[in-house]
Image (cartoon, grey):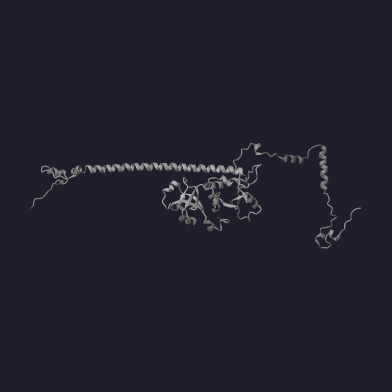
Amino acid sequence: MRPLVESETKIVFDKLANYLSDLKGLIAPLDDGDRYVFRLNHSRVYYVRLSIANLATSISRDQLLSLGTCLGKLTKSGKFRLHITALPILAEHARYKIWVKENGAQPFLYGSNVVKAHIGRWSEDCPEHSGCVVYSMSDVPLGFGVTSRSTADCRRLDPTGIVCFRQADCGEYLRDEDTLFSGGA
Amino acid sequence: MAPTKTVKNKHAANGSGIRGSKTSKMGPKKDNVIMKSKNNKSNPSHASVTHARGRPNIAELLKVRKKKRVYSAKELGIPELNMITPVGVEKPKGKKKGKVFVDDRESMNTILAIVQAEKEGQIESKLIKARQMEEIREARRVEAAAKEAERDAEFSNTKDSIRKGGKKRRSAFRYEPPMEGDIKDYQVTGINATQPKKKRVSFANE
């Protein structure tokens, strides 16, 4: 387990900035004087309290399975892939949001993209190819994705047209149970 | 008093003691003392002679000559070759070895501010582009609607004019039978104009 180097930090922040409106809140000091830091172990990036990260130094790299919140994985090609485990952090400071109706929640949780017919509400002035968090109508975050078109373009779309390409959904907790915390995913 | 040596096997010192053995054939050794060779004795006397005369020894001179000065490429003025130095070979001095971690809040904040500014710029440009495209589309739509309205108005005008002047037009198009004198003309120029007769050649009946 080690802190991120500058290039890695930039890549991680770059990805997070697609989804979050305010990144500074991530590393702001807490009331008890503690703060959150980013740690890397087995090419996975964790978002963890500094005090817990310091405690975790007593555990060897091989033995350490996970700590704090797993944000995602740094791939060998130098990109960062967000995991569904990062959803609570993304949902808290999301820049663009999409609410899906009851009939659209299940297809999304089974791994489908969001089509226009399933959309209940959406954020205005959302450009194309920007990250958005998908919620149910009762404001429960279900996953996140990337918009296929801008909001204005989506209005002209037919009901079966894709509005948001899925990136991760809560169904992955079951579907990718074996590889989510360790292994190839 | 000199220390006395204890010899465990005195035959072993001068071979094995067996008659036909290898060591017995080699001949007797006087002692385990290494003797100086005669040549060694003669050389120092030689050297001492030359030193005495004040001349440098030839061997020494040769040794001195062999020591050549090694010139660096800079001293010789050789142009530098355009060589590729691998990434790991050049090691900057005075720098930290290995990875430089970003763990303090200040450096993290700097990176964060840069990234966020970049992203904001990208999103802003996307939004501006989308708005411009939307404006263009809206203008086109308005133009198309205006053209459609114009065409509709023209069409309705035409219909109205047809309705109002219907009788006149109908009479203009109505068929009126020609007068007697004009029949020939009419046949040539009118609707039922007959084609002119062709010249025919016929043979007299036999």
> Residue placed at 38% from the left, 42% from the top?
B140
Which residue lies at the image location 57% right of the left edge and 46% below the top edge?
Answer: A25
Query: Farthest residue in the left direction?
Result: B206
Q: Nearer the viewer, residue A102 or B53?
A: A102
Q: Quadrant of residue B21?
A: bottom right
How many numbered marks are there? 0
Residue at position x 35%, y 43% in the image:
B145
Task: Report the front residue among B92 and B182.
Answer: B182
Q: Position of residue A117 (x, y in %)?
A: 43, 53
Residue B130 pos. (x, y %) = 45, 43
User: What percent of the width, then of the height, locates residue B153?
Assistant: 30, 42
Q: Residue at x 56, y 42 (%)?
A: B113
Locate residue B150 relative to residue B173 in the image: left or right.
right
Left or right relative to B170: residue A151: right
Relative horizontal placement of residue B150, taking residue A125 as reference (left or right): left
Please tell me which residue lies in front, B77 or B206.
B77
Q: Quadrant of residue B50?
A: top right
State the image coordinates of residue B134 (x, y, percent, origin top left): 42, 43
Residue at the far right in the pictured view: B1
